[in-house]
Image: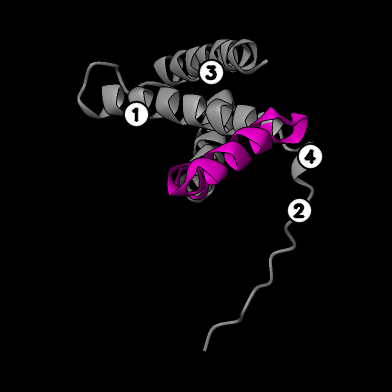
Amino acid sequence: MGKIVKKQRPVNLDLRTINQPVSAIASILHRISGIITFIAVGILLWLLGMSLSSQEGFQHASEIMTGFFAKFILWGILTALGYHICGGIRHVLMDFGFLEESLATGKTSAKLAIVIAVILSILAGVLIW
C-alpha cells in the first residue's frame, strides 16, 4: 500500500474575506430573490383571500396595507420579484444564445441586471409610498 500524504492546505471559511466576482453575486442574489418570491406568494395569497372573503375582510386587508411595516414588506417583495425577473431574463438570454457565454459578457450582464433591479426597486418604493 502506498503512503497517505496529508496536504496542509489553508482553509478560509470567512466568506467576508473572499472577493466574489459580480456574476457570482448576481447568481447568489437570484437564488435568494427566488426564495423570497416563493415565500411572498403565500403572504400575498393570504392577503388576497382575506380581501375577497367579505367586506370586513377587505377593510381589514386595507388597514393592514396602510402600515409602514406592511408597505416595507411589500416593497421587499416587489424588489425581490423585480431582481428575480431581471436575473431570469439574463439567464434565458444566455441559454438561448442571445448573449455570448464569456466572462466579459457574464460580468456586464450581471452588472446590468443589478442596475435595472435597483431602478425597479426605487420605482417600487415610489409606487408604494
Part of the protein shown in magenta: 46-70
Horizontal side of residue 113 vs 18, given as left or right: left
**Which mark is drawn over residue 117?**
3
Q: Amino acid at mark 3?
A: Ala
Q: Is residue 101 visible?
A: yes
For image coordinates 48% across by 18% down, the residue present is: 113
Q: Residues within 10 Å of mark 2 (few under 14, many from 20)?
A: few
Cα distance between the residues tagged 4 and 3: 23 Å
Magenta-span inclusion, residue 72: no
Q: Nearer the viewer, residue 50 or 102?
A: 50
Q: Nearer the viewer, residue 75 or 54?
A: 54
Q: Quadrant of the C terminus?
A: top right
Q: Which residue is mark 2?
A: 13
Magenta-span inclusion, residue 55: yes
Q: Which residue is mark 1?
A: 91
Q: Position of residue 34 (x, y in %)?
A: 48, 42
Give the secondary structure at mark 2. loop
Q: Amino acid at mark 4?
A: Arg
Check the image and name the residue furthest to the bottom.
1
**Which mark is drawn over residue 16?**
4
Cα distance between the residues tagged 4 and 2: 9 Å
Q: Amino acid at mark 2?
A: Leu
For the stretch drawn in magenta, the main secondary structure is helix
**Which mark is drawn over residue 39?**
none
Q: Position of residue 25 (x, y in %)?
A: 59, 31
Q: Position of residue 51 (x, y in %)?
A: 49, 42
